[in-house]
Image: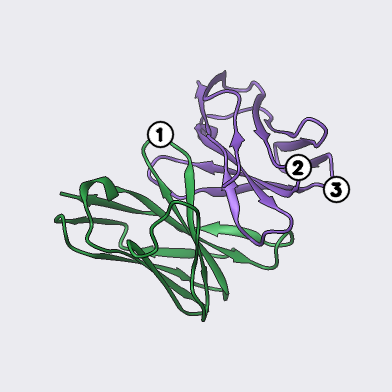
Chain colours: A purple, B green
Amino acid sequence: GESVGLHLPTLSVQEGDNSIINCAYSNSASDYFIWYKQESGKGPQFIIDIRSNMDKRQGQRVTVLLNKTVKHLSLQIAATQPGDSAVYFCAENIGNTGNQFYFGTGTSLTVIP
Amino acid sequence: GAVVSQHPSRVICKSGTSVKIECRSLDFQATTMFWYRQFPKQSLMLMATSNEGSKATYEQGVEKDKFLINHASLTLSTLTVTSAHPEDSSFYICSALAGGRGTGELFFGEGSRLTVL
């Protein structure tokens, strides 16, 4: 697999604040990225994806930013809620190697009420 | 939305026995499914790519004789952990791609927690 790492293993934020979760990837051939949320004892849930021909993509309360120059990805969660507490992973797909996705280390987000 | 189901969700077995985990796509066909392994407080590690009608593709370092994968239909892939040992205890998660690469979503099952005594 390829190296996909996260800068911060844990993050605590106050309810209502914005959260930013970062991810670094190492393979410049990666061209499709997905952010997942995983709650304890469950499988990952799709949050948002982005292709390498985009710099930014917005969803409901979430925004993903992609900086291909420095191979960096971030997930921004607006108005963080207690239900957002979970582990967040970024996953990358390398353009010419099929449908495999490789996951980063993960960041545990805790929202303080 | 697309649903991927895993069974069993939890299994406990004795060392030396084999355990089969099923992964089903419930409302879509998946020619390709993926098996991941996750240790506590760690990330998901891709083990293998399960291809319908052909042999699975294993990631480097994953023993194909230890983790047997069969993808007999467009909606079912199975992972068999053969001669399980305590170090095989882990959370095994499958996923299936709905739609083509870059256009569809990768849906995950709820995981199967294996405990080998």
* Label 2: which secondary element: loop
- Spot occupied by residue B68 in the image (x, y as percentages of width and height): 36, 67
Q: Are the residues under badges 3 and 2 in a single subunit?
A: yes
Marks 2 and 1 sit apart, C-alpha to C-alpha, by 27 Å
Judge the density around disc 2: few (<14), some (14-19), many (≥20) Cα neighbours within 10 Å: few
Q: Residue at x 23, y 65 (%)?
A: B18
Report the amino acid beneath label 1: Lys
Q: Quadrant of residue B72?
A: bottom left
- Taking the image as drawn, is residue A28 in sight? yes
Residue B41 is labelled as: 1
Residue under label 2, please give it: A28
Judge the density around disc 3: few (<14), some (14-19), many (≥20) Cα neighbours within 10 Å: few
Marks 1 and 3 sit apart, C-alpha to C-alpha, by 32 Å
Of all chains, the one bearing label 3 is: A
- Spot occupied by residue A51 in the image (x, y as percentages of width and height): 78, 49
Q: Quadrant of residue A6?
A: top right
Compare marks 3 and 2 and give the one earlier in the sequence: 2
Residue under label 3, please give it: A53
